[in-house]
Image (spheres, rainbow, N blue to C red):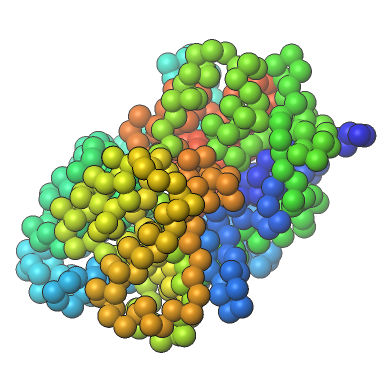
Amino acid sequence: MAQNQYEYIIIGAGHNGLTAAAYLAKQGKKVLVLERRSIVGGSVATESFGEHFTVDSIHAGGKLRPDIIKDLKLASHGLQVDSAPQPFISLLPDSPPLILDPHPAKAAEAIKKFSEKDSARWADFVRFMDKAASILDAAYATIMPRLPKNMNLREGYGLLELGLELRLAGRKDMLNFIRALPMSALELAEEYFESEIVRAAIASVAIHGSTLGPMSAGTGYTLIHNWLNRGGLANINVGKAGEITNALANAVKSFGGEIRTDSEALKIKIENQIAKGVVLANGEEISANVILSSADPKHTLLTLVGARELPPEFVWHTQSIKMRGSVAKIHLQTNGNHNIPQGTSVVAPSIKYLEKAYDASKYGEISEKPYLEITTSGNTVSIHFQFAPYQLKTGAWRLETKKVEKLALDTLSEYFPNFQSLIANSHIITPLDLETTYGLTEGDINHGQLMLDQFLFMRPIPCWSNHKTPIDNLYLCGSGVHGGGGVSGVSGRNVIKVLN
């Protein structure tokens, strides 16, 4: 078939791919975005699963970095989401819930009934977490050089700016930030709080989306990461994830870019170690000067490129990327009288409870007593379920869907006894669905686990942290690269710095 010529092809219309495409189109580049599904958004999408049954499929809301919203003028492209902070509610079996209001003074007052000492420490904890998040944000804005390879002057300057940011944070905050990264969430929480209930509530945010327990090393880092992306403990813009990616898609089109849905990239065409274009599932070939992939690194490099086009050591490192998805989603349509409070509610009554839920995933088992995070939007209730490992020791996911739904509902009914009678419809997304429907290898919503050996200059793999690949003119811009994971747009923004 005749080939079309574009300057840039972006594979995947998730929020990072669309962010990169919008920046390039704004620069006047001829850009084409290819999306395998019939809608844009990837894992940041709001979908209908029936009449009056519309939910955020995977990520509960979210927000882009403020500079992206400003640079791309997304407000003028339909981004009208409300970023007002919401309460974070820890549901408790034998007492009223712990309600952590976004206003520190109100949260401290709620903590008093569990611990006077913890109430007094809450403001200090929030101040540290906000400072740590700002430092991590600066690190994510810095293009990581290909350590231990030789750095060029531009990369060295980026690290110099990051070093200055750390220095300006103050000696105490800088050291505490560095100390916190390898700590477990339990250890970090113990430095501030004595109440098991308060510690567990905080630790639940640290393990959200990761196959880790609150006692796992490095969950201090994931706590800061999730705090940064959420702007605190609770999710924001719940029910409006699709507004983020629709605004980005509108921006791409307004700047002259093109988006094609129902267009699955089957292979990246390589000639003499140079990316030349994309072959679609229907056989169509489209050429371009540069290819950007917002798909996860494993899928991009091992499937779209192919191992034989890559150096053996690079292939080994790519194969070794830890995915290990263990998240399921249960979306429920109710009659509107569910009585679940607005905000983010969690079933995380103790550290032991969370750790035991994680223990099941180590052995390929679904947690019988799961960690749940519950959000609502109108008459719908969405449950984030952990742990539901992609790799099951026994059984298959096509047979286990109902089990996950039953475990989630039985657990939630302990706190809302009449809840099950209010359900009119349900839609379950298993880790296998995350892979087959949403293109997330092993059901990993972060395109690779957020772990200490997979962050900064080691994300996605050591020596390849700057969006580049061994294939000339092929770049990675999805959540699997440095700065990615969750909803932020950082990966799509940062790749533009490498290209310019």
Eyeballing the image, is 376 above or below 456? below
Q: Quick check: 180 left or right of 25?
A: left
Eyeballing the image, is 185 above or below 462? below
Report the residue at 48% width, 40% height from top.
442
Eyeballing the image, is 249 above or below 97? above
> Which one is in front, 173 or 494?
494
Q: Is residue 413 visible?
A: yes
> Which one is in front, 17 or 346?
346
Report the residue at 72% width, 60% height from top.
250
**Quarter of the figure with residue 373:** bottom left
Report the residue at 37% width, 78% height from top.
420
> Which one is in front, 411 or 38?
411
Question: The N terminus lies in which quarter of the figure?
Answer: top right
Question: The C terminus lies in which quarter of the figure?
Answer: top right
Give residue 126's position: percent from left, percent from top: 25, 59
Q: Is residue 104 visible?
A: no
**Quarter of the figure with residue 324:** top left
Q: Quick check: 222 left or right of 111?
A: right
Total residue callouts: 0
**Quarter of the figure with residue 452:** top left
Report the residue at 44% width, 68% height from top.
382
Give residue 438's position: percent from left, percent from top: 58, 50
Give residue 182's position: percent from left, percent from top: 25, 36
Give residue 199's position: percent from left, percent from top: 17, 57
